[in-house]
Amino acid sequence: MAERLNLSILDRLPASVERPRYRRDELSRGIVHIGIGNFHRAHMALYLHDLFQEGRDLDWAIVGAGVRQGDARMRDELAEQDWLTTLVELDPERDRPVVTGPMIDFVPIARDNAPLIKAMSDPAIRIVSLTVTEGGYYIDPASGAFDPDHPDMQADAATPDQPVSAFGAIIAALQARRAAGVAPFTVMSCDNLPENGHVTRDTVLGLARQIDGETADWIAAEVAFPNAMVDRITPATSDRERKMVRERWGIEDARPIACESFRQWVLEDKFTAGRPAFETVGVTMTDDVAPFETMKIRILNGGHATIAYPSALLGLHYVHEAIRHPLVRAFLDRVEREEIIPIVPPVPDTDLDDYYAQVVTRLENPGVGDTVPRLCLDGSNRQPKFILPSVRDRLAAGQEVESLSLVSALWARYLGGPVEDGTPIEVQDEAAERLVTYAQRAKKDPAAFLQLKEIFGSLADEPRFAAPFARHLSALWSDGTASVLARHTGL
């Protein structure tokens, strides 16, 4: 019979389940992490769990936090299980079930973020880390610069003592520490976006300058914002994962996680007030994250964007089914080998063809249960970060973008809906209404879609991209996805 996960059942778990060897009362807070989602608990939290398992750095435990009212439910559910998480690393050879416990508290959710500010003001906190999604940094997609006109930023600038955003709360906590003579903390993004440390710094400083110029100058001089490359495929939790841990290991967990066995973290060794010994548990500490980051974003995330929309239009649900579909796989191979990999700069001690082969193996893993709808999420943020940089680099080098322009055309066709069998498409994107409007206009006039200047910028006026995009989109509407992919790949 399954038991509800909490500290009292750890000794009764099956021998196959790894559980903390460290005691909760041995841990003390050192990190506030904002955004306690599946990726954080399967990535950074697991690295800390592994570190604590060695009996090291027990003063770097996590205090969870959130800035959305929806985070309150997560807090309540994790509180009932003493902040523990059941994580299952799914591997074709052997699954690894782990109960992790590096989080020791979770800040109460409040509209003015006062509890969060208080937690970050604690001198024991030396790192504030974030996973607030790629689109959560208040960046203009077209310019790549901080957007001071966003309503949240305007609100925080007007009432800085009652911030609505994580960044407003971070600034308020840094101000409180400065006033108290306490050293500032490091601000460490764990989100999947290029130069995430620089982006985080730009957002914090951009908002700080609207609040108080002197504070902004102090933050710029004293606070570290390390860049990081993070990688692990971590699907959302569903009844599938709850049933798995209940039936296989007798654990009743409201928020279990099932993910791939692969994980990678490349982290710039740049911290304001010390850090855990991450390098002892597999983190690559470096002075330059950029080569690793470019490789991952272009090849893995670009690959995700490449297969997402044709797979959805063909009615495929799971990623492992999509990667095994002849047309989808052939299209991915052509995009990667002909247009993406050739322009990825060299990466230390890494063969790019081997890296791509590893990506395909990861996508083929049926145990993970990653879904095509997840890959289709948030295209307005992902296309400008994962696909269009490769387009621009190729054009700058005088090279064609025949396949990459088809990737963008497939996105436009997906947004125009429905799936070719008539199934409606529910677009999950913060800009969904605007995207769908432009995509439907583009059914008759493909150039209309490229007028989304916040996404495509000057590419709308670049005939070497706009012309093949228009040709591909027209063909998708007239001939269908399968026919277009078959012609394009020669199948």
Image: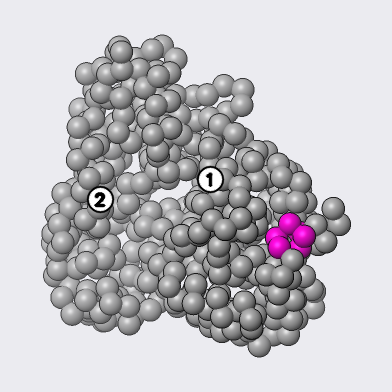
Query: Could you say whether the residue bearing mark 1 is in a helix, strand or loop?
Result: loop
Left/right placement of residue 65 relative to residue 199 reads: left
The amino acid type of the residue labelled 2 equals Asp
Circle 2 residue: 71
Task: Indicate whether 4 appears above or below 122.
Answer: above
Q: Position of residue 40 (x, y in %)?
A: 39, 45
Front label number (2 vs 1): 1
The amino acid type of the residue labelled 1 equals Thr
Q: Are marks 2 and 1 in contact (CB under 8 Å)?
A: no
- Front-most of 72 and 153? 72
Q: Position of residue 195 (x, y in %)?
A: 51, 64
Q: Position of residue 158 (x, y in %)?
A: 18, 80
Q: Which residue is rendered at x = 26% and y = 65% of the image?
A: 165
Q: Which tag, 2 or 1, sits closer to the chain's start?
A: 2
Task: Indicate whether 105 appears above or below 98.
Answer: below
Q: Which residue is rendered at x = 53% and y = 42% of the image?
A: 370
Q: Which residue is rendered at x = 25% and y = 36% of the image?
A: 78
